[in-house]
Amino acid sequence: LFPARGLESKDPHATDARSFVMPSSPVNVCMFGTGEYTTGFTGKGAANSDKSTGVVALVLLDLRRRGLVARLGMVGTNGKKLPTIRAHMQCVLGDVYAGIDPGCIETWPSDDVIDPKAYERAVAAFNPGDCAIIFTPDDTHVSIASACLERGMHVMITKPPAKTLEEHNHIANAALKANRLCVVEVHKRFDPIYVDARDRISSLGDFSFFTSYMSQPKHQLETFKAWAGRSSDISYYLNAHHIDFHEWCMQGRARPERVTALASNGVADTLLDGVSTEDTITLAVVWRNRRVGASDTKIAQRLDESERKRRRDQEEGTAVGAKHAAKQWGASFAGGTLGHATYTSSWIAPKADVHSQQRWFYMGTSGEVNVDQAHRGYNMATDSSGFASVNPLFWKPTRDATTGEFSGQRCYGYISFESFVQAAAACNAGERAP
């Protein structure tokens, strides 16, 4: 599962999803999950966050308006909530944006049914080559993604795709067997500041130190009450953002060797009515740099050979070749220098000028980078909402002042989904291979 990885193409210069052109045929998409990130709806109505409109459904409805998406479906587990969710979406989407019609979305299960396996009927209603976008509790990802891949659908999964290496490999192997695109939704890889920082980091020598912090306000635990501390924790939910970003920066240059976890508790378990879970989690990770003198060309050749062996072994049912390639790859780090990193996430932060504090610091042996993602030098104040720092680079729910249309197409929260839809269409057309 490689989020922003380039697909095999007839064009040797096409390296990632940003190089796609408009697909010749729109794709059908089924959304799995009906919660805040998809619809903006919570158990108490519209989300009290920067995502009251939802993200996934609004993006896909706009892609449908633009002709990139055709049929839309959405799957939950409690059909009794669906009429209220539809009314919410009509209020915050259909009645607000010109050309957006949430009434076109087919839903599962039936309005009078509670069915944890409603996804099975929804999958059966879609066809090979259609797309699945999964934003459900973490412990449901594997079963839903597996069903979609077995059906022949292209799959996008929210982070983390799985919580164990065994489950991750299961999904990866299912994607290989189905010959379908399977990606993780990590929108920070499309943030222009993060992209620029990654490119600059490549020239700052060996890795020495990285630290990140990301939080959510404690009132958000009410939104997460159905799954917080049960199916996942705050580290899986938030640390995944900056762990992925750091891994992306280090590809081929350094690798993690040892992980230690630290935690604080006492607040979340009270707010969650006795569910035992951590308030704040820090992962302390030891990294090792590739040793000096290990040729970039040879490393690239080893990576290519490892991938070829992995695909061949999948077809032949043996892992011997892949293990040999991995051993060769690992040897290039022997004797390399050490770096370390800490990744901290919390969901007991106070209400502030931003919904989520997000910042990180990177130090290389010849330079450093410091990014505060939450504060982009843009703030405003209103009588109703008070003071706030605004980040329209991620998400822009404000409509176009002239046309009344949704106008967030260049936000990296939007581009992440658009790129996946375009990639799936290119695979269906035979222009790319998963």
Image (spheres, rainbow, N blue to C red):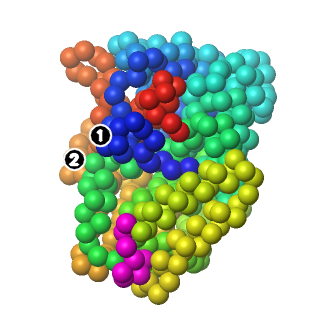
Q: In the figure, 235 relative to 124: above or below?
A: below
The residue singled out by tag 2 in the image is: 378
Residue drawn where x is 49% and y is 61% of the image: 303
70 on left or right of 178: left
Q: Position of residue 135 (x, y in %)?
A: 59, 39
User: Residue type at mark 2?
Assistant: Tyr
Q: Nearer the viewer, residue 223 or 430?
A: 430
Mark nearer the viewer, 2 or 1 = 1
Q: Position of residue 346 (x, y in %)?
A: 51, 62
Give the quadrant of residue 150: top right
Residue drawn where x is 46% and y is 41% of the image: 8
User: Residue type at mark 1?
Assistant: Pro
The residue singled out by tag 1 in the image is: 392
**At numbered mark 2, what does the secondary structure look like: helix, strand or loop?**
loop
Q: Which residues are magenta?
A: 290-297
Q: Position of residue 25 (x, y in %)?
A: 45, 17
**At numbered mark 1, what does the secondary structure look like: helix, strand or loop?**
loop
CA separation, marks 2 and 1?
9 Å
